[in-house]
Image (spheres, coloured by chain):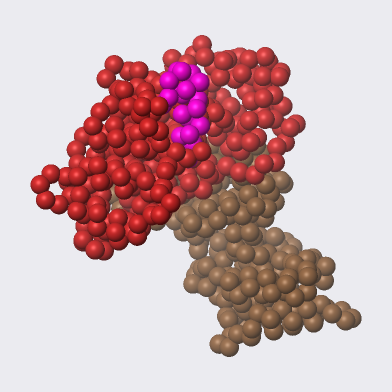
Chain colours: A brown, B red
Amino acid sequence: MSTLSVPAEVPSPAEDAEKLYQAFSGWGTNEGQIVSILAHRNAEQRRVIRKVYAETYGEDLLKSLDKELSQEFEKLVLLWTLDPAERDALLANEAVRKWNPRDRVLIEIACARSSTELILVRQAYHVRYKKSLEEDVACHTTGDIRKLLLPLLTAYRYEGTEVNMVLAKSEAKILHENISDKAYNHEDLIRIISTRSKTQLAATFNHYIDLFENPILKDLEPEAEDEYVSLLVAAIQCLSLPEEYFEKVLRLAINKLGTDEEALARVVATRAEVDLGKVGEAYYRRNSVSLAHAVASDTSGDYQAMLVALIGHDPSC
Amino acid sequence: MSTLSVPAEVPSPAEDAEKLYQAFSGWGTNEGQIVSILAHRNAEQRRVIRKVYAETYGEDLLKSLDKELSQEFEKLVLLWTLDPAERDALLANEAVRKWNPRDRVLIEIACARSSTELILVRQAYHVRYKKSLEEDVACHTTGDIRKLLLPLLTAYRYEGTEVNMVLAKSEAKILHENISDKAYNHEDLIRIISTRSKTQLAATFNHYIDLFENPILKDLEPEAEDEYVSLLVAAIQCLSLPEEYFEKVLRLAINKLGTDEEALARVVATRAEVDLGKVGEAYYRRNSVSLAHAVASDTSGDYQAMLVALIGHDPSC
């Protein structure tokens, strides 16, 4: 459920490109104009605007934005304007370079994208960085975290609806056994989480509850402070409950003393065209305040305007 | 260097489909006609013939071939007629189902295809088997062999020409250290072999010789009888010297008491449109007899005719 609102009559890409060019011209930048255009165009429309802009004005739109904007607003507009696969490649590369095991970006890219989207990210990574995502990740990580991250990032999961119930049951038992033994890095556990289809995993997690009472995430909770286990938990959440996962990331980002702008911008930019509507619903259920309102209260200026435009609600509601 | 010979004037796919249909009709099958058409059409042409055949005669060409042909000839014609990605998916699935650690098929698919081809194989596997290649492989293998096979099969290697010489040198040292310690399953060794681009690996293997005298394969030789090490050796050969690797597979297949038809058909069907010319040159250098001649001496009938047509030389030469 996308929160993107595209006008019924979309101006031509040439008109959009021209208005953007005008917004950069003269004294000061017209940020409102930038928001009113870019925040209301889908990925394909933005791609064409970028192409037409480069052909007409001889500069990549991203470069113009980079020169004209600043701080969080700039970061958000750039992230949003990028093609989704390119955006993920950039986020992944940033995550690898500033490697921090608490960072969830690689898990999100590996587990909360479709199989085809993940391949496109890997292709975009080749083009942009002249190497593969997996060689960078393998090179910057070690031990259990590498053992988990690599198969997740290189997976090409089946996406059909077929479920093997016998397998789901037997693998629920394997997961439970590994977790009971605190063998969170067991190769069978990693194999199941990193190769099975999301539909199959949903069945496995259901059998887990049926057979052992608790949801699998509940059984992992006691160890959730551990760096490796917390990544495993994030992977399971992104695979099975992405809306609840992203709701929590947003909640923590907003509630933090001095909003976590990076997480906020990332989730809004990467989910607006995917499921930000459902994330917003989960947010309202959990916090009794609308996501747009919470974000608006916590931010200001052009940055606020862009966020709220992407979240798709009036800040007063 | 492909060995495929396509006539200068190719009949229309409809004509080809009709001639194939005729070859199946009446008393007996006209195997010569089948060879004269299919062995002289490239993958794209075969794909269109198959499409037109299904539209015109209401049956998949592969099914007709399956009904009309038999034994090694059937197997070879079917393999050849399949789309390359579908063919690899089928070979991989067969290898997984009859899992034998001596089988080289999965290594060949993982290491002797381009990055894009390997992705296409994984897509074809989804379509055909309603699951992912990696979940099947992960499920049927264990231990070190799984640790090596999975990252090889899920790799999407960078394919540009850029080489990092400093990295090549440092990774040559890591490989040498692991091999000297007999730590053939060391995670750094597997990481390097399974993630670096083929160009980068070529530089690394060259530094290995410069620094430590022997080629890396020479240093692995003493342990080559070990199942795991022999797979590792095959991976390195497929990545760096595919022609020599396939030359050896053919040599062993032909010299075996009672030719290894499976290996022979597989290598000819999978390499004819890729590098069978160079494999043939390597064969001649090593055996002082042409590949076509060796194959012709070892086989007979329609099977022989099809093989020789694909190898692309007159058996008398």
Q: Is the magenta region chiefly helix, strand or loop?
A: helix
Q: Residue furthest right?
A: A27
Question: Residue A4 appears in which quarter of the rendering?
Answer: bottom right
Question: Residue A145 at what x, y percent from top left?
Answer: 58, 39
Q: Quadrant of residue A240?
A: bottom left
- The reply, left or right, for residue B287 in relation to residue B308 is right
Tell me the quarter of the image containing the C terminus of chain B: top left
Q: Range of the magenta residues?
A: B274-291
Position of residue B72 measured from the top left corner of the image (x, y, whole percent): 25, 33
Q: Nearer the viewer, residue A25 or B248?
A: B248
**How many numbered markers are drawn?**
0
Q: Is residue B284 magenta?
A: yes
Q: Is residue B118 above or below residue B164?
A: below
| Residue closest to the far left | B27
Residue A268 seen in the current view: yes
- Percent from the top left, x then y, of residue B267? 39, 33
Where residue B34 appears, as percent x and y from the top left, is 26, 46
Q: Residue furthest bottom?
A: A9
Q: Is residue A37 rendered magenta in the image?
A: no
Q: Residue at x 74, y 82 (%)?
A: A18
Residue displayed at 81% across by 77% down: A24
- Whether residue A203 sits left or right of residue A53 in the image: it is left
Q: Quarter of the image holding residue B308?
A: top left
